[in-house]
């Protein structure tokens, strides 16, 4: 734009260099006033880009005053210099391009009145038609530019929407593939666990119970996967809707972990039933991930869970002791390149709470989450524990 501004100033200077020397040919102006009159005719042009309405107002006002203040020479038949007329037309065109409709209407009507006043008869009518043509042409150019800008913007929006749609379709495809693969293998786990006591010889009652526990856990995981991802299947197959987990499922998850062989001990204080569903779902997923991390990184270690339901806040802590020397692993939740802790933090934030996860000095690991209790209970606290 700097080049355009410089070009406008140069054109204005050229017009001034024409208007000043030729002024004695058109009007009877004293020598001291010639630079001023020439400037009024030419210099409003420099405002054509910065403020065309102001430039037109200066040019039109000087066009109204100059014929009254100075007489024309006998051989000149126009009330203004040619430079002045060209600048006024150019500024009116710029107003049509850039100014609001109300300003354009005022400029058009005022210009026609000025030309009618100083060019009566057929000349005035002809110039009025010319002024109208300039305004109409400016409006057409303005409409064309605006249409092209809107078209470019719409194409940009459409391209963005296409990109988003492509990403969503790719995510949906990945989710469908994940569902199909995981569902298939989890179904195989259920079948193998349930049929183990019939396929294998000398399966004890305790081993049969373990197989049944494995099958139950696999079925539960399979149902949850179907509930979350089944809707993304492209074949139109509808899965039976299942209720989302909530706070009432926390103790069931703890019991399942104990049946799976983890040494889990827990204490629950307060009315778990008072926890809102969204908060309960966040706590359920965070507890699942915390127990999975403990089982993976600190096998055979004692895991202590404390859930305290207050009038306005629910606090849950999951602490695992260091892994025994025979099965030393990294601290549960330590950075392994996964997204477990980040996912837990996201769930806590989604429930309007926060989560802290860090290794303990003794080598264990602690996860603490604070979330608001959306449905405070007015009953007295209830304490339940299982510290076996």
Image (cartoon, rainbow, N blue to C red):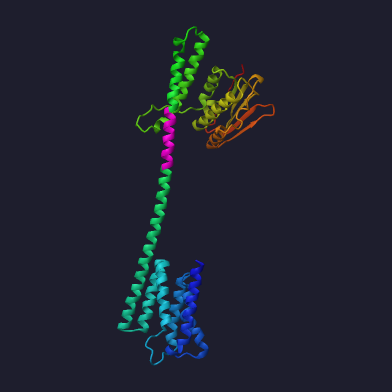
173 versus 24 height, above or below: above
Report how many numbered discs are placed on residues in the image.
Answer: 0
Residue at 52%, 11% in the rendered image: 207
Depth check: give the residue in front, 213 or 64. Answer: 213
Depth check: give the residue in front, 244 or 332. Answer: 332
On-image quarter of the C terminus:
top right
Residue 242's x, y, as percent?
A: 42, 26
Residue at 37%, 66% in the rendered image: 141
Residue at 44%, 20% in the rendered image: 188
Judged left or right of residue 147, residue 377 is: right
Give the overall secondary structure of the magenta segment.
helix
Instruction: Assess whether residue 177 is covered by the magenta stretch.
Output: yes
Residue at 41%, 74% in the rendered image: 90
Judged left or right of residue 121, residue 259 is: right
Instruction: Assess whether residue 280 is covered by the magenta stretch.
Output: no
Depth check: give the residue in front, 328 or 263. Answer: 328
- The picture quadrant where one finds residue 372 is top right
Q: Is residue 378 visible?
A: no
Residue 29's x, y, as percent?
A: 47, 90
Depth check: give the residue in front, 210 or 116. Answer: 210
Q: Residue furthest right?
A: 361
Residue 219's x, y, as percent?
A: 45, 21
- The picture quadrant where one finds residue 260 is top right
66 versus 388 height, above or below: below
Q: Which range is magenta?
A: 166-180
């Amino acid at each position: 734009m700097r080049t355009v501004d410089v070009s406008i100033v140069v054109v204005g200077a050229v017009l001034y260099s024409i208007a000043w020397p030729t002024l004695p040919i058109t009007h009877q102006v004293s020598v001291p006033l010639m630079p001023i009159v020439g400037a009024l005719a030419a210099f409003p042009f420099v405002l054509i880009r910065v403020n065309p309405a102001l430039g037109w107002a200066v040019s039109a006002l000087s066009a109204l005053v100059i014929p009254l203040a100075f007489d024309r020479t006998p051989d000149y038949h126009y009330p203004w210099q040619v430079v002045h007329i060209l600048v006024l037309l150019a500024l009116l065109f710029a107003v049509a391009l850039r100014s609001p409709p109300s300003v354009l209407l005022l400029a058009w009507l005022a210009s026609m009145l000025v030309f009618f006043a100083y060019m009566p008869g057929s000349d005035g009518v002809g110039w009025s038609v010319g002024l109208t043509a300039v305004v109409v042409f400016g409006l057409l150019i303005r409409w064309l530019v605006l249409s092209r800008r809107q078209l470019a913007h719409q194409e940009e929006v459409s391209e963005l929407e296409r990109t988003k749609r492509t990403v969503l379709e790719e995510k949906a495809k990945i989710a469908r593939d994940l569902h199909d693969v995981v569902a298939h293998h989890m179904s195989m786990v259920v079948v193998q666990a349930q049929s183990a006591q019939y396929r294998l010889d000398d399966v004890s009652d305790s081993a049969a119970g373990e197989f049944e526990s494995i099958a139950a856990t696999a079925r539960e995981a399979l149902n949850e996967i179907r509930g979350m991802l089944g809707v993304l299947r492209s074949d139109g197959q509808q899965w039976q809707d299942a209720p989302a987990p909530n706070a009432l499922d926390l103790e069931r998850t703890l019991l399942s972990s104990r049946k799976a062989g983890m040494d889990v001990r827990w204490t629950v204080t307060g009315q778990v039933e008072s926890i809102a569903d969204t908060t309960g779902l966040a706590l359920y997923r965070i507890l699942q991930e915390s127990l999975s991390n403990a089982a993976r990184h600190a096998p055979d270690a004692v895991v202590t869970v404390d859930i305290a339901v207050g009038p306005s806040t629910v606090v849950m802590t999951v602490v695992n002791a260091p892994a025994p020397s025979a099965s030393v692993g990294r601290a549960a939740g330590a950075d392994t390149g996964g997204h477990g802790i980040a996912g837990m933090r996201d769930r806590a934030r989604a429930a309007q709470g926060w989560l802290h996860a860090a290794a303990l000095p003794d080598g264990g690991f602690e996860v603490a989450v604070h979330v608001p209790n959306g449905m405070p209970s007015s009953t007295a606290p209830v304490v339940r524990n299982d510290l076996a």
